[in-house]
Image (cartoon, helix red, strand yellow):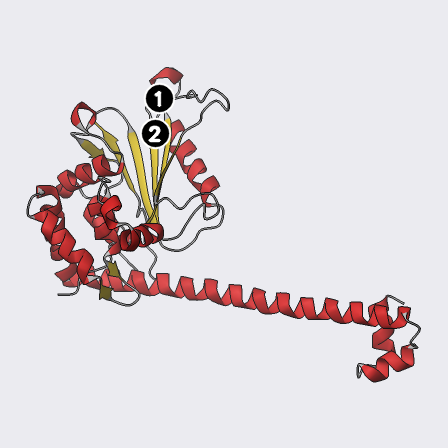
Amino acid sequence: MQYLDLKMDFMFKQLFGHPSRKSITMAFLNALLHRTGDDRIIDVQFENTELTKETEDGKTGRLDVIVRTNRGERIHVEIQIIPQYGMPERLLYYWAKLFSSSLSKGERYDILPPTIMIAILNYPLFPHETDRFHTVFHIREDEEQFLWSHHLEFHVLDLSQFMVKWKKYRREVKQSPEWPWLTMLSAVDGRTKKMDEEMFRELEGIAMTEQDILEALEEWQNLSVDPENRYAYEMRLKWLLDQLSNIRGSREEGRQEGLKQGREEGKNETIRKMVEKGMSITDVAHILDMTEEEVRERLGD
């Protein structure tokens, strides 16, 4: 069968953002946050369970996942396959909104709950700073490294870097508790409609001993064969592919414009040097197949 790509935010919300699949969500979060033993999340309450139906243009609302845990934390999870401008600032802005919305008028600041942002991306957010697929951020004192507050925590998971690590350092990758879940998110490419068979076999293998993974695979299959769900998924995929195409078109247009500008600046420099060497405006115009007026304009005369 053809499994639907869980990197599509619509599918991600279906699997990880529905109360009927709460156990999957908790296992997923515990793996991503490296929670074990008494530190594990044992219950969550979803704060945005509604899922607006897909329209013909692919627009849909509330495709992130927001939960409140039994420990009183609020966790916001979102997945993005299209590079977003100003993503670090965007995540900080959403964290601030979520954090501040926890406090009602007149309440004390010390009752604000820890708020955790998890961004799952299909592209590197900090390509020049790190090649790790999971990075964690807090506010710390510059020299002594102590925390400002336990209330702020950011996780960035880069699926593109995960794939690189998976292919080169699989044994090392398998030491991380999040690897089965990131494998699940990475196994299918919605754009090519292909599945990485080796990755899927790995998932089937771990599902034989891990009940949470088995349950997630079964729910993934059920969601993938549901006709109404597939239609909504296809509409969302079409819209996202159009967005990617527009981004590539804009980049190519900008590249061509840059090349054109570079050529024009090079021509201006050539004209300036020719005149500096004593050539007349008439000779320069003749050699470069330009009018004398065009040569003067480029010289700023």
Q: Residue 248 placed where, x, y %?
A: 47, 65
For badge 2, the amino acid type reads Thr
Q: Nearer the viewer, residue 27 or 63?
A: 27
- Residue under numbered circle 2: 115
Q: Nearer the viewer, mark 1 or mark 2?
A: 2
Q: Which mark is residue 48?
A: none
Residue 26 shows in this picture: yes
Left or right of 40, for residue 271: right
| Placement of 105 over or under 62, stated as above or below | above
Q: Label 1: how many residues lie within 10 Å, few (<14), some (14-19) or many (20+)? A: some
Contact between marks 1 and 2 (CB within 8 A): the answer is: yes
Determine the residue positioned at 25% across, 48% down. Answer: 182
Quadrant into which the C terminus falls: bottom right
Quadrant into which the N terminus falls: bottom left
Q: Residue 188 placed where, x, y %?
A: 24, 60
Residue 220 shows in this picture: no
Left or right of 79, for residue 261: right
For badge 1, the amino acid type reads Leu
Determine the residue positioned at 9% across, 43% down. Answer: 210
Q: Nearer the viewer, residue 220 or 261?
A: 261
Determine the residue positioned at 21% across, 50% down. Answer: 14
Q: Residue 226 placed where, x, y %?
A: 13, 60
| Placement of 247 over or under 102, stated as above or below | below
Q: Secondary structure at mark 1?
A: loop
Q: Residue 141 placed where, x, y %?
A: 48, 22
Q: Which mark is residue 112?
A: 1
Which picture quadrant has residue 291?
A: bottom right
Q: Label 2: how many residues lie within 10 Å, few (<14), some (14-19) or many (20+)? A: many
Q: Secondary structure at mark 2?
A: strand
